[in-house]
């Protein structure tokens, strides 16, 4: 994909989100609005209420509500990161390994805070290098605006501190099968017993 | 001929509560400045030119918005996007005490403020834009070194319940902007971009107000700005607070 067509798809994402944000409806770019509208008892704390569109490492478009029914484990990183991210990534892999097979699907999601640099191609390469190329791994990027909004939902703070580097919170969050946050793990290489338990309970 | 007409026109405007001159936006010419936080030590930041609402968004303004967008009414806003105190001084979904009409809307979450601005075809200002605009005094674009300037802001911060006062009743700053430091504190689009209190936000952050980050300040004299950065770093996007409102930019 060329830079130009990438820019175009980003513009598409922006325009869709602006329309959705102001229509007051939970409409999304790919028509998943119906699903939200019919499910009456949408949890008031569910992240499915975010109408933003995201691009995966395979270049597919998706919204959070597409992941309904799955347990989500999320973290925010950027692929050119040399400091905390490798450890955060290791923490994610440790969680995935220890949780193992579950009855409900668990999706491990790495959200880029540097969408400009982290193109789908780059995310895919990062996934491959870190042996995170199974179906349970999802890498996402969106517009800067949507990224900031998602970070705010997770109470993750971040800032670009140089052209290449970001400073950011080290938080791993767990969402249940209806999109409500049930647990957060703060810090690097901390004891992950509680997080594993939260994932196991949510995926029962 | 033109001058008398202008005077007559101006005279008609004086004394009205909804001064149309004050509505709308002002253009802020971009430039370079050294912010207190959010850049390296003494590092200069470039801010592009932008437009900013002259006044904070009022309760009356926000009423017009929720009438059109029921999703953001007091009883309807999802808990993900606003905590339990959302619009708590409003009596019902579509009513508040009449005295509040021209006062800045407060108890508003970042998500609600963002949605409001997007529906006006605008956005929230960035922290750098807001601070750049707010360092202007009456005469110059940067009066931070003027002790009277800081004293005035701190005096306003000390005055209780300023969120109940009507907007636009005082002097505009160099850019023609009102009340930036007088009535309420204001949301910025990237309020979470300065990390000065570390990651320990497990306690109720609204009570968190300490001096932990002060040693990094590039300008220790500007205590008022320090208070704003400390406040921003202590809040989360769904928080709603009595003295926190917003205005939009473009």
Image (cartoon, coloured by chain):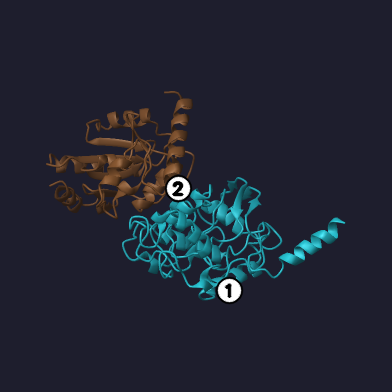
Chain colours: A brown, B cyan
Image location of residue B11, percent across then percent down: 76, 66
**Tag 1, which secondary structure?**
helix
Task: Report the residue marked by disc 2.
Answer: A22
Q: What residue is at 42 percent from the left and 59 percent from the top?
A: B109
Using a 10 Å C-alpha cutoff, classify the residue at mark 1 as few (fewer than 14 neighbours), some (14 to 19) or many (20 or more). few
The answer to whether residue B175 is left or right of residue B99 is right
The answer to whether residue B109 is left or right of residue B44 is left
Image location of residue B132, percent across then percent down: 60, 54
Q: Of tags 1 and 2, which is closer to the observer?
A: 2
In the foreground, B198 or B236: B236
Task: Report the residue marked by disc 1.
Answer: B155
Q: What residue is at 48 percent from the left and 53 percent from the top?
A: B116
In the foreground, B232 or A62: A62
Taking the image as drawn, is residue B195 in sight?
no
Q: What residue is at 58 percent from the left and 62 percent from the top?
A: B180
Image location of residue A90, percent across then percent down: 25, 41
Query: Chain for mark 1?
Result: B
Q: In this view, does B95 lie above or below B249?
A: below
Residue at the right extreme, as displayed: B1
Taking the image as drawn, is residue A10 in sight?
yes
In the foreground, B48 or A23: A23
Where residue B171 is drawn, which disc sits there? none
Q: Is residue A60 above or below residue A192?
A: above
Q: What residue is at 46 percent from the left and 54 percent from the top?
A: B68
**Tag 2, which secondary structure?**
helix
């Amino acid at each position: 994909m060329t830079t130009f067509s990438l820019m175009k798809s980003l513009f598409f994402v922006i325009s869709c989100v602006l329309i959705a944000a102001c229509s007051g409806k939970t409409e999304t770019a790919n028509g998943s609005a119906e699903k939200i509208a019919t499910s009456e008892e949408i949890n008031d704390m569910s992240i499915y209420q975010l109408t933003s569109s995201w691009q995966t490492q395979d270049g597919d478009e998706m919204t959070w509500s597409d992941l309904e029914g799955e347990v989500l484990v999320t973290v925010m990183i950027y692929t050119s990161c040399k400091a905390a991210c490798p450890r955060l990534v290791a923490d994610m892999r440790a969680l995935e390994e220890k949780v193992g097979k579950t009855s409900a699907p668990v999706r491990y999601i790495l959200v880029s805070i540097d969408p400009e640099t982290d193109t789908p191609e780059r995310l895919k390469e990062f996934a491959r290098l870190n042996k995170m190329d199974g179906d349970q791994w999802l890498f996402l990027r969106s517009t800067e605006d949507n990224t900031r909004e998602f970070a705010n939902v997770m109470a993750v703070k971040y800032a670009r501190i140089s052209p290449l580097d970001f400073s950011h919170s080290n938080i791993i969050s767990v969402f249940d099968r209806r999109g409500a946050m049930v647990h957060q793990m703060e810090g690097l290489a901390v004891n992950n017993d509680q997080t594993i338990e939260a994932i196991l309970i949510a995926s029962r | 001929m033109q001058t008398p007409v202008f005077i007559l026109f101006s005279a008609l405007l004086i004394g009205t509560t909804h001064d149309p001159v004050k509505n709308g936006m002002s253009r802020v010419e971009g430039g370079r400045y050294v912010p207190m936080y959010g850049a390296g030590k003494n590092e200069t930041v470039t801010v592009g030119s932008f437009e900013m609402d002259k006044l904070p968004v009022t309760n009356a303004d926000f009423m017009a918005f929720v009438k059109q967008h029921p999703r953001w009414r007091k009883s309807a806003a999802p808990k993900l996007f606003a905590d339990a105190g959302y619009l708590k001084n409003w009596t019902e979904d579509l009513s508040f005490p009449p005295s509040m009409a021209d006062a800045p809307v407060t108890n508003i979450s970042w998500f609600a403020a963002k949605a409001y601005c997007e529906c006006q075809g605008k956005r929230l200002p960035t922290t750098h834009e807001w601070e750049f605009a707010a360092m202007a005094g009456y005469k110059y674009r940067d009066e931070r070194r003027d002790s009277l300037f800081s004293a005035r802001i701190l005096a306003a911060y000390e005055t209780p319940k300023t969120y109940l006062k009507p907007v636009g009743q005082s002097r505009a700053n160099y850019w023609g902007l009102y009340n930036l430091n007088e009535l309420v504190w204001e949301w910025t689009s990237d309020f979470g971009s300065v990390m000065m209190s570390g990651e320990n936000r497990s306690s109720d952050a609204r009570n968190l107000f300490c001096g932990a980050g002060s040693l990094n300040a590039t300008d220790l004299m500007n205590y008022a700005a320090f208070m704003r950065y400390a406040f921003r770093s202590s809040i989360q996007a769904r928080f709603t607070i009595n003295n926190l409102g917003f205005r939009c930019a473009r």
